[in-house]
Amino acid sequence: MSAPFNPRPVPPDERTLGAWDYTVLWGSYGAGLLVMVAGTLLVPALGFGAAIAAIVAGTVIGNLILLVPTVMGADHGLPTMASLRPTLGSAGSYLPSVVNVVQLVGWTAFELIIMTRAAGAITHRLLGTSLHWFWLVFFTLVCVAFALGGPLVVVRVWLEKVGIWLLLLTTVYLTYYLLSHYGLSRALSQPGKGGLTFPQAVDIVVAMPLSWLPLAADYSRFARSARRAALGTYVGFFVTNIWFYALGALAVLALGTSGIVQAILALPIGVAALILVLVDETDNAFADLYSCAVSAGNIFSRVPQRAFVVLFGVVAFVAAAVLPMGRYESFLFLLGSVFAPLFGVVTADYFLLRRRRIDADAVYEKSGPAFDWMAVFSWAVGVAAYQFITRDLPQVGASIPSFAIAGVLYLALRAVTRFLPGPGGRPDRPGS
């Protein structure tokens, strides 16, 4: 039988990943069909030049926030949801854990659907049949196998030796083809047709690195140092996120369609290119499934992590088979929106109040408060701000304002209660 999930920090002798490892890992995570699909949302509403500016600005901003859990995980060797315990309390950390499990099961299912449809399109062209159920089972088994292997196996055995080079080859080819057949100057001269403001476009781009916030520390906890993890994470995700958003936007202009799978298939050697993209796409589904199991371990630490991997793999398979994923995708984005304000609170607490000092070995002990009302209240206000801005001020963009509002409110509440008697002030917070 598998051993129970070990909630303790990753020991120093297992923290072996360096800057290059994280550049490869996050370079792979920043790429994929779903990123290209997101890029198609920017044009022709914006001109291509404005879209590129929004892509760069959104990636710069989103990546900075992504470094928050990255540094936390590397500092203390704890996964993301466990790292939230000092801020939210042990019971308070269960809420983001549950939300994260739900969204990651959904994203795993959505990745399975995308890969199954793409592989089905290939076999339909070659064999006259899509083999839908074969591909759905196949990709589910591959993702479960990767998640059982864990980050060290995926990075060192798969991505660095095979996956990242296949991705690079495919991306260079797609970029060359689109630019040679459409032209960069022609793309830059294309005017926007309206319907999307520049801040909204930035928010669309920021959403991609923010969607990885609940996962980042699950991988950075294996880093040799916080500096190496932060450098590799930022560089890897920066390059490929910009590249694939831009490819999606350029594909709309060059090919006249937002249907990425069919557009790639229509290219010369399109089948080979799509196969290589699919090969890389599996690691995104692995990341969702693996972190789903890790997040569940924050609540049920006695259940073997391997059992969670298999369980959630089965659930994702069923979801991919039966759910109307077009509607479910919107629900997943709604769930994901809670993490921007949450990490506004966590940033204020961990970096400004605690100054990156926590007792990692005591994180799972019951001695601390089970529920920190100031942190949870500030988080809730941030979520409400996000929803208000999205509904009533869509031209502003909601991610960064909600992040800032939640963080500033939390600091204000701490300042007000600092000198009050009882647990509100908690003068021992930096070491708690």
Image (spheres, helix red, strand yellow):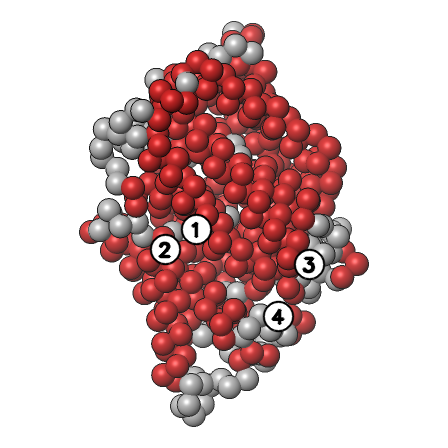
Relative to 128, say whether 218 is above or below: below
Between disc 2 and disc 1, whose residue precedes?
Answer: 1
Q: Which mark is residue 225?
A: 3
On the image, the x and y values in percent for residue 248 come to 42, 28
* Disc 3 from disc 4: Cα separation: 23 Å
Confirm or deny contact between disc 3 and disc 1 (CB under 8 A).
no
Dot 3 or dot 1: first in sequence order is 1
Q: CA distance from mark 3 to mark 1?
A: 23 Å
Give the alpha-carbon distance from disc 4 to disc 1, as whole Å.
Answer: 32 Å
Sequence-wise, the earlier of marks 3 and 2 is 3
The tag earlier along the polypeptide, 4 or 2, is 4
Whether the residues at callouts 2 and 1 have beta carbons within 8 Å, the answer is: yes
As shown in the figure, which amino acid type bears the numbered disc 2?
Ile
Q: Which residue is mark 1?
A: 61
Residue at the image position 49 percent from the left and 33 percent from the top:
243
**Amino acid beneath label 4:** Tyr
Q: Within 10 angstroms of label 1, few (less than 14), some, or many (20 or more) residues?
A: some
Q: What's under tag 3, amino acid-wise?
A: Ser
Comparing 244 with 90, the one in front is 244
Residue 125 coordinates in the image, percent (x, y): 51, 9
Q: Is residue 67 left or right of residue 414?
A: right
